[in-house]
Amino acid sequence: MKKKNLPLLEHVEITGVAAEGKAIARVDDMVVFVPYCVPGDVVDLQVTKKKHSFMEARVARLITPSAHRCEPVCKHYGTCGGCKWQILPYEEQLRWKQQQVEDNLTRIGKLELPAISPILGSKKTYRYRNKLEFAFADHRWLTTEQMKAGIPFTPGIGFHIPNCFDKVLQIDECHLMDDYNNAIRNGIYAKAVELGLTFYNERSHEGDIRNLMLRNNHADEWMIVVVFAGGDKLSDAQTALLTYIRDTFSKVVSLMYCINNKMNDTIGDLSVEVFAGADHIFEQMEGLQFKVGPKSFYQTNTDQAYELYKVARDFAFAEIEHNNAVVYDLYTGTGTIANFVARRAKKVIGIEYVPEAIEDAKTNARINGLENTAFFAGDMKDILTTDFIAAHGQPDIIITDPPRAGMHEDVVNVILKAAPKRIVYVSCNPATQARDLALLSADYTITAVQPVDMFPHTQHVENVVRLDKKA
């Protein structure tokens, strides 16, 4: 249907929430997906896309605000694309996330479940992240109102507009991380402009400065990684920018840079160089130290990661004698969960596809004096063989924490073949988790379910499920 023929839907009530942080309405037996509104709103909707089974729309007019609606904290709300649920009180966010987990497990997985435990909310709902990444752009995104006001297309630094790889919204203030992130980002932006550095263009692949990554820890120590482009060595202006950062921001204990002249923004295959300080920071959890480098994966909500890992550990060792279990930790990453549970296990085997992550896992075990862990890099289905299990011990417990896509069916079959007494499945995507649980359910019974909210004001939710082998 041509855009000019798309209808205006009047006096529509929003009834629920859905994926990607959008809300749901129903009109003439069709589902309508709408961003930036909440259940209970009555709105006029301008349809932007119409298919046979659903429509997408935007709010043309808010007629009656929902009783659950609240004011967003962020000045960039509605344009940035992040934190879409800011206009929904946090208790309501948790209620819908709980419902999302239940719906996915029952409707997609069609699983028999015990009572699902109440979701664990995050104590911090703002300034909870330990990592943010920003992009530089030679022409920042402007809203229609800004263009009408005559604001020029100056260079900018911020977040990509949703579904637009080359459009970057200038971010003046982000509430997701400690406020120091704003001082760093805005200071770097102003200095880069002063030095005449050109900002990156995603289409022409030209520009001197491309990306910025910030990390911090509980000790209020900061890591900065500046990603440059445009040459094989630092220019005088690029060096001057790094010198400014080093001399200005006293909390920065790790200042690094990378030169990326590729067609994509990933730096996993590139060398990251130290300009000042160390090449890492440390995070602590229950007396354990974890080394975090520029490429390390570490849960971005530090406080809530502790709650998540405690759930996984409690599920793993409930009614199992301490220090008597062999644990396999699949998708171990840098070994955070493996090292976290090691004190209660006889032995922990961590398996991960990325070799660099496995080296970090070994380092973290060594730092913490853990001698009952071993880590292996490679494809899960290739490593977890009969010979491997014979060499390292039959797993009593398997903990698996896969990416959003879930586990490959081959990996599920490998787990079934390994036949542990218990499986603990940690997931950031209850939909793919439900699919995998259905495959495991022939041999296993779900005995506990615990949702955990890691990302307030977004639709994302973590879920931990315990499965015990059937008699």
Image (tube, grey):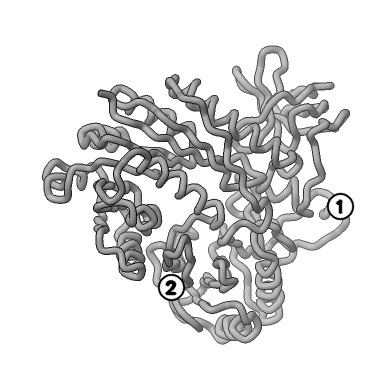
Q: On screen, 264 above or below 82?
A: below
- Quarter location, residue 48: top right
Type of amino acid at the residue the image marks with label 2: Val
| Image point (42%, 44%), residue name | 314
Percent across and percent down for residue 197 are: 63, 77
Specify whether residue 471 is in view. Answer: yes
The mark that comes first in sequence, 2 or 1, is 1
Q: On screen, 399 above or below 54?
A: below
| Image point (25%, 23%), residue name | 471
Is residue 294 shown left or right of residue 16?
Answer: left
Specify whether residue 1 is in view. Answer: no
Helix, strand, or loop for circle 1? helix
Q: On screen, 216 above or below 334?
A: below
| Image point (37%, 59%), residue name | 334
Percent across and percent down for residue 78 are: 75, 45
- Residue identifier under label 2: 272
- In the image shown, does 87 or 20 lie closer to the viewer? 87
- Residue identifier under label 1: 148
| Image point (51%, 73%), residue name | 230
Cα gap from disc 2 to disc 1, whole angstroms: 42 Å
- In the image shown, does 337 or 447 lie closer to the viewer? 447
Type of amino acid at the residue the image marks with label 1: Lys
- In the image shown, does 284 or 202 lie closer to the viewer? 284
Percent across and percent down for residue 64 are: 87, 29
The quadrant of the picture occupied by the N terminus is top right
Task: Tell me the mark number nearer the camera, choosing from 2 and 1.
Answer: 2
